[in-house]
Amino acid sequence: MKRHIVMIVVGLSLAFGHVAAQTKGTTKEASAQREKFDPQRDPEKDLKAAVTLASKSGQRILLDVGGEWCSWCHKLDKFFQENKDVSEFLQSNYIVVKINYSKENKNEKFLSKYPEVKGYPQLFVLDNKGKLLHSQDTGALETGDHHDHDKVFDFLKKWATKKVS
């Protein structure tokens, strides 16, 4: 019986590991690692895991749609690494799920449920049950050749779950 429970825990850990790693960020190594857009990932499974976590935590879900080919996707990841205040707010208030879009895997079936993406990265804010609340073109969060700290932070604050005082 004990072995059976251990196997279940290990299985759930592996299933939720992709999404759960986004919420932890406890070690320098984990926070320094940039999660890549992976054409092999199953966005349906990742979203299901995110909904499970978000339902328990009360966090929103942020779908980050892009690809390894996308320079602005790399810039957004770098922005979150370099802006600790924004990164901490993101980790406290959102479960982030990266959704790959590339010639290897366009994830068309999954993305067909959401508004049309006109540029990358594209962010979709979902409630803790997975319902779409907002679609965000990240071009509106840029200034010149970089993401604007205040625009990105204001966006995240606006769509975060309102905390009851």
Image (tube, rainbow, N blue to C red):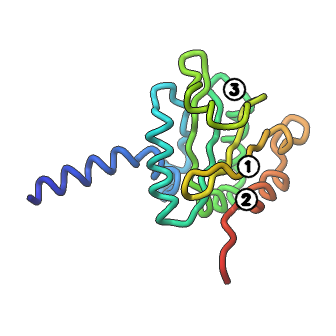
- Which residue does the image show at 77% across and 61% down from the upper left? 158
Out of 155 and 76, give the one closest to the viewer: 155
Disc marking residue 121:
none
Q: Residues within 10 Å of mark 3 (few under 14, many from 20)?
A: some
Callout 3: SS: loop
Task: Kindly identify which residue carries mark 2.
Answer: 159
Q: Position of residue 152 (x, y in %)?
A: 79, 51
- Which residue does the image show at 79% across and 40% down from the upper left? 138
- Residue 43 left/right relative to 8: right
- Which residue does the image show at 66% across and 55% down from the upper left? 87
Give the amino acid type for the residue marked by disc 1 in the picture. Answer: His
Q: Earlier in the sequence, mark 2 or mark 3?
A: 3
- Residue 20 left/right relative to 163: left
**Quarter of the image containing the N terminus?**
bottom left
Q: CA distance from mark 1 to mark 2?
A: 8 Å
In this rendering, the label closer to the viewer, 1 or 3? 1
Q: In the image, is residue 82 above or below residue 69?
A: below
Disc marking residue 134:
1
Q: CA distance from mark 1 to mark 3?
A: 22 Å
Outermost residue, top side: 103
Q: Position of residue 153 (x, y in %)?
A: 78, 57
- Which residue does the image show at 40% across and 48% down from the upper left? 16
Q: Position of residue 97 (x, y in %)?
A: 56, 44
State if disc 2 and disc 1 touch (CB < 8 Å): yes
Give the amino acid type for the residue marked by disc 2 in the picture. Answer: Trp
Q: Residues within 10 Å of mark 2 (few under 14, many from 20)?
A: some
Q: Earlier in the sequence, mark 1 or mark 2?
A: 1
Task: Kindly identify which residue carries mark 3.
Answer: 70
